[in-house]
Image: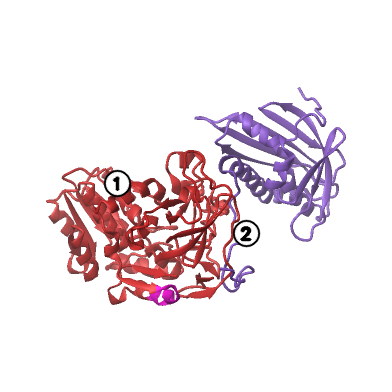
Chain colours: A red, B purple
Amino acid sequence: MRAVTWHGRNDVRVERVSDPSILNPRDAILKVTATAICGSDLHLYHGFIPTMREGDILGHEFMGEVVEAGPGLDGNGGRDGIHVGDRVVVGFPIACGRCWHCEREEYSLCDNSNPNAWMAEELYGHSGAGLYGYSHLMGGYAGGQAEYVRVPFADVGCLKVPAEVDDLAVLFLSDILPTGWQAAEVCEIQPDDVVAVWGCGPVGQFVIRSAKLLGAGRVIAIDRFPERLTLARKGGADTLDYEDEESLLAALRDETAGRGPDACIDAVGLEAHGHGVLAIYDRVKHAVRLETDRPTALRQAIQACRKGGTVSIPGVYGGLVDKFPLGAAFSKGLRIRMGQTHVQRYMPALLETILAGEIDPAEIVTHRLPLDEAPNGYATFAEKEDGCVKVVLTP
Amino acid sequence: MVQCMGLTGRIGKGLAAAGAVAAGTMIARRWVGAEGAPARIDAVVTIRKPRAEVWAFLQDPGNHSAVVPGLTLSPAGERWRARFRPPGDLPEIEWEIETLQAVEPERLVLSSIPGSDFDATAVTRLEEAPGGGTELRVEFEIHPPQRTVAVAARGLEPVTERALAQVLRRIKHLLEAGEIPTTDGQPAGAGRANGAGASTR
């Protein structure tokens, strides 16, 4: 089959590789019908996530048709079985559904899906769930930017989707729609709340739409790319171009009459841009790998947030940050929520939201390419050329 | 009270973990020096299953090969014979094991027969975890062979502790999820052993 493989910094290729096969009883094999490049894939592309190996197959946003099902997928434990012919979308965390965390619907913290848990334990103290196509630290699983993909624990990871719904309408249930939703939900938004969102990329767009659906009084979206700010306004947000502001923090104080936003959501993560001395400091340290993450957006979110407010972090961070304003967070009594998304918790309800027409995930797609064009897709997305917000690949 | 249970007694977790640490002991034997002090390693895991179920799992010799690749067990009179083929070019080793104490479903003490290639004692404890489940603890005391440098044996402790922890993790995987997560045999691109294989679809 053909698959998108990682070969180093800014080097992804489409190669012929062997087909996946059933390795465990609860595995399924999918024929992929649509797969997307995630903003977090760009962290791999740029070489900022450790433990990638040459030849790793990328991709954690995908859907398709089940073409092979393991013997453990006939249905048990109250779950429907997974069968050949099912059309499914797959959540990016690989979760057993039976451990202490999965019982609490904390699927991204699954105890039983990372074959390389010892690596994560050495770095983080404990291991979260295995992830598709996202480094050997996260399990080393082959990803779904391919013609076929193996889905472990398919009875937990797969959501069946109606035949009449287009791929683009449901593909993002795999990651970025639930990620945006969780990031907003953990803020416990109240009707008059002001929610500020850093980053109007794909996750930021779904944070905006989720915050509105959850009843936010006002959403202020922050970015610098006109097409992304336009899309944010389409989603119901007011917008701030941070390059137009002498001080973003002053602008947010002004917008909230001095209180600060009730919730500040960092949908940027470890490759934040910015300006000023601190941003330059981060870029230099990041470039020479003396700092793994550039927390510009996170610092601003903490500084901007109102006293007693919530800072939510759906953006990916992988290691160590410098100049983290812990004193500000402490003195303002902030609540900080973060983590990989418990995708499977949200998929069924969000599917209903899509079917009811309350959210249209397809509106963020700017580029549809054949799988063979994946290297161009990565480059275009990474450079934000051609108005690129989201790339979907068709095998 | 310590009692010898023999073949009808219990084997248990310590036996499985023995395979993992046996590899470390084999390496230790290659050091030459004075008689060494015992090395002690331990690991613990919480399993979301009742103690009786964990205990029963540990009694099935077939489960031991699953959690310690290369380890096979067979009855040998009142004892058990363990065979372990370490990865790499190290030779296969064998040793016999007797059960010194078995208190179902709480405590199991196993020991290799004096003079074995692999000379160790394992204490396995099963305690109820807060909120349900079982805390499974295994402590090994490994006696380095004669003329092995004690320092070398102690130097292996982090390696063997990781191996032991991995064994306990596999037990947890099997009991909770019904399978051990793996990527062995999955496709990969050029430059990897399993890359660029034949396409059948």
**Nearer to the camera, A367 or B159:** A367
**Nearer to the camera, A275 or B6:** B6
The answer to whether any part of residue A228 appears in the image is: yes
Q: Chain of mark 2?
A: B
Residue A376: in magenta span: yes
Which of labels 1 and 2 is toward the front? 2
The kind of secondary structure element at disc 1 is helix
The answer to whether any part of residue A323 appears in the image is: no
Q: Is residue A130 above or below residue B126?
A: below
Q: Answer left or right for A332 relative to A318.
A: left
Q: Where is residue B9 drawn, in percent x and y?
A: 78, 29
Q: Which residue is mark 1?
A: A185
Q: Residues within 10 Å of mark 1 (few under 14, many from 20)?
A: some
Q: Which residues are magenta?
A: A370-379
Q: Chain of mark 1?
A: A
Q: Where is residue B160 drawn, in percent x and y?
A: 69, 48
Mark number displayed over residue B96: none
Q: Which residue is mark 2?
A: B184
Q: Looking at the image, which residue is at 57% across and 47% down?
A: A72
Disc 2 marks which amino acid?
Answer: Asp
Q: Answer left or right for A69 relative to A344.
A: right
Residue A293: in magenta span: no
Q: Is residue A179 above or below residue B201?
A: above
Q: Residues within 10 Å of mark 2 (few under 14, many from 20)?
A: few
Q: Where is residue A347 drawn, in percent x and y?
A: 37, 49
Disc 1 marks which amino acid?
Answer: Glu
Which quarter of the image is occupied by the N terminus of chain A? bottom right
Cβ atoms under marks 1 and 2 closer than 8 Å: no
Secondary structure predominantly adopted by residues drawn in magenta: helix
The kind of secondary structure element at disc 2 is loop
Q: Where is residue A395 drawn, in percent x and y?
A: 45, 70
